Image (cartoon, grey):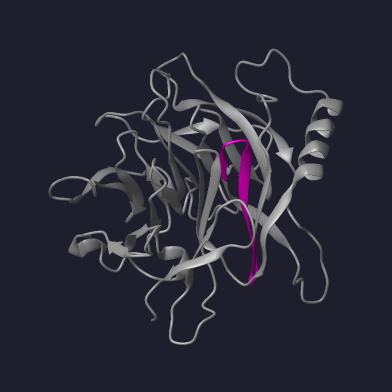
Amino acid sequence: MANEAFFSKDGRTVTMGLGSRGRTGLVQVDIATGKITQAPLPAELKEESIESVAAGSEGEVLFLAKDGVWVWTPAAAKPVVKHVCATAPVVSATDLFVATVPSTPLTDCLFVSGNESVDATSMGTFYGRKPGGKHTFLSIFCRRVSSATGGVFSDDGRLFFVSEGDVWEGGIQVDDDTGTERLGTLVGARIAPLAIMNTDEANGGSMWVQHVAPAGKWIYAQLRGRHMSAILRTPLPAKPMYAPTSNDSPSAKDQLDAMAHSLNKTEVIADDMEYAAGFCAIEIGGTPRVFFCGDATEENKGPALMLWEGTGRPRVIGHLPQE
């Protein structure tokens, strides 16, 4: 799972928006054959750049387009695309994710990142919407950091996200007062400082974490810079360091120990790429699968669809059509 693409629960298909590749459309990729199936988008979405997708609790495909959340049900007898809700008051919402673990205060809540002003300089923080037609997106109070993006829940409900280019873990403390104008408060701590930062005349070497995907015992991370991308993985902590259920905030030593462990165990899966989009990860039967859409390296073929399965280098399983 991640915010530009996600695996089906059986790991056989990947659903991916093509907006991050500068294209229009929403597709499913068959992992075994590389076959691409286009979503039956209505006329009003035919030219939309769809970048953010998420899996619903029943396997439906949710995505952002035209200042709203839409749903596609590819497994239905007659697959259709329908509008779910507006993302207002959020302007240019990004990074859709969904809480799918049953029987929690956040079950089936939709989340995005963004701001309420077109002039905002921050990448934005989280907003959440409870299920049901009467609800709108409400802010999630974020006190200590200026941005919270790329949110994603693990299969057991742990929340991971990106802030200032690094990997954080935390949770959302839901407000008990139903009369407040916010859904809750973000609680969390940085667990993996994976951003690659430097400066020079060209500033050609900096990359920051853009998306994360917890799978098995690892957190997979997509790093992106100017004409640069990399895929890494770092160990998933055995338990959250800081979450709404924590009694105290972590000490300096707690946090330094956690970050040191993550850095010592971080592995590089793919590097030296100009671009990587549609990143997502899953673990099936103890074997990881990491998918991404990479560079166009073969003549007369579009960007390569890449798969990594735990060892060796990622392999090509297909290509997007050539433009």
**Residue 264, percent across and down?**
82, 43
Task: Using residue 317 as the reference point, say whether residue 238 is left or right of it.
Answer: right
**Residue 166, percent across and down?**
69, 46
Residue sitting at x 40%, y 45% = 54
Residue sitting at x 62%, y 72% = 274
**Residue 222, percent across and down?**
61, 55
Task: Using residue 91 as the reference point, say whether residue 245 is left or right of it.
Answer: right
**Residue 60, percent across and down?**
29, 42
Q: Which residues are magenta?
A: 213-230
Front residue of 107/141: it is: 107
Task: Using residue 193 as the reference point, say whether residue 155 is left or right of it.
Answer: left
Report if residue 295 is visible in the image. yes
Report if residue 125 is visible in the image. no
Residue sitting at x 32%, y 56% = 66
Q: Residue furthest left?
A: 78
Answer with the quarter of the image where residue 223 lies: bottom right
Judge whether residue 219 is colored magenta. Answer: yes
Q: Is residue 216 above or below residue 14?
A: above
The quadrant of the rendering that contains the C terminus is: bottom left
Answer with the quarter of the image where residue 89 lies: top left
Front residue of 305/51: it is: 305
